Amino acid sequence: MKNTSVTPAALNNSATAAVTMLVTPEMAKELLKRNTHNRNLRERAVADYARDMAAGKWLMNGEAIKFAADGTLLDGQHRLHAVVAAGVPVMMLVVTGLDASTQETMDAGRRRNAADAFSLRGEVNATVLASTLKRVWMWEQGDFKFAQNRIPTVAECAALLVERPEIRRSVEIAVRIHGLFRYIPHSSLGTSHHLLSRINGPEAVWFFARLGDGAELPAGHPVLALRQRVMSERADRRTIPDYRYMAYIIRAWNACRDGRDLGRIQQAPDAPMPMPK
């Protein structure tokens, strides 16, 4: 295959062909005029792809922009829209001359997520690592309640890990603490450990050790209040959103930092997320 361009005339081709080409935003707009028979556009997917493209993190992985023999776009509308949104040219594989019926079999497999990617890289605790990176990234974007209006791509999670390799240590500790105290999800433990360790590492070591074992905690101690709160809610079989676990942990942390007793931890659904100090 050669690096070339596909003209509108070449899209109407009964013989299957494949070429690599640099797709510019202007070219993407022209190709999208052939998008007359496709699934509904997912704006978030376009935004995710566009961020990777604009950051230079988009890699050509063999997935093609596909056209039917009559020139109809069969697959690739999200990537083409992302090129337009990012405003940068992107190298892509383009396949033409396909039977229109093949569209029914496209994208039938499960898309690889960040956990899959980190597992392929040989990362330990890949699933917990991926979920922790996702929540740290969202927190840094100001999404303190993890509403998921904007979630990181695999490339953005990988970039965050390069920037903050210490997150691996937070994940290791999260797995260890969860083994001792199974009432808080791995991702909440990993995310909070990373955030609190950046504020005060030695105090975070003690805080999470006591969260795990509950040793020598007097009545009124914030960590004891934290343990009792999550155990009580789990005993009642309540569904606790991730952000509430984070709020409970931060409230206990802040009370420890202030030297305050804490008899009970509360977080109303409409209350803002407390910020760690």
Image (cartoon, rainbow, N blue to C red):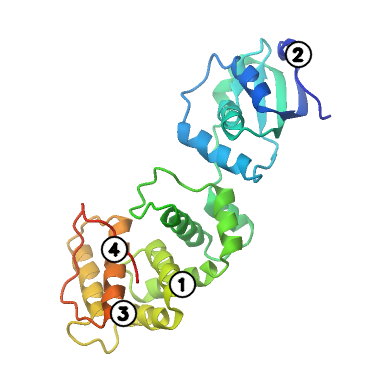
Q: Is residue 84 left or right of residue 143?
A: right
At which x and y percent is residue 180? 36, 76
Q: What residue is drawn where x is 38% and y is 51%?
A: 143
Mark closer to the chain start, 2 or 3: 2
Q: Earlier in the sequence, mark 4 or mark 3?
A: 3
Q: Give the quarter of the figure containing the N terminus.
A: top right
Callout 4: SS? loop
Q: Is residue 84 above or below residue 13?
A: below
Nearer-N-terminus badge (1/4): 1
Distance in Å between CA atoms under marks 3 and 1: 14 Å
Which tag is nearer the camera, tag 4 or tag 2? Answer: 4
On the rendered image, what quadrant is the C terminus found in? bottom left
Amino acid type, label 1: Arg
Q: Residue at x 57, y 25 (%)?
A: 77
Is tag 3's residue or tag 1's residue first in the polypeptide sequence? 1
Which one is in front, 158 or 139? 139
Tag 4: residue type?
Pro
Q: Vertically, is 237 above or below 73? A: below
Q: CA distance from mark 4 to mark 3?
A: 14 Å
The label on residue 274 is 4
Q: Residue tagged by mark 3?
A: 257
Image position, residue 102 (x, y; %):
61, 21
Q: Quadrant of residue 226?
A: bottom left
Q: Residue at x 75, y 19 (%)?
A: 6
Tell me: 86 left or right of 150: right
Around disc 3, counting alpha carbons within 10 Å, would you say few (fewer than 14), some (14 to 19), or many (20 or more)? some
Q: CA distance from mark 4 to mark 2?
A: 58 Å
Task: Say which of 190 and 111 sits in front.
Answer: 190
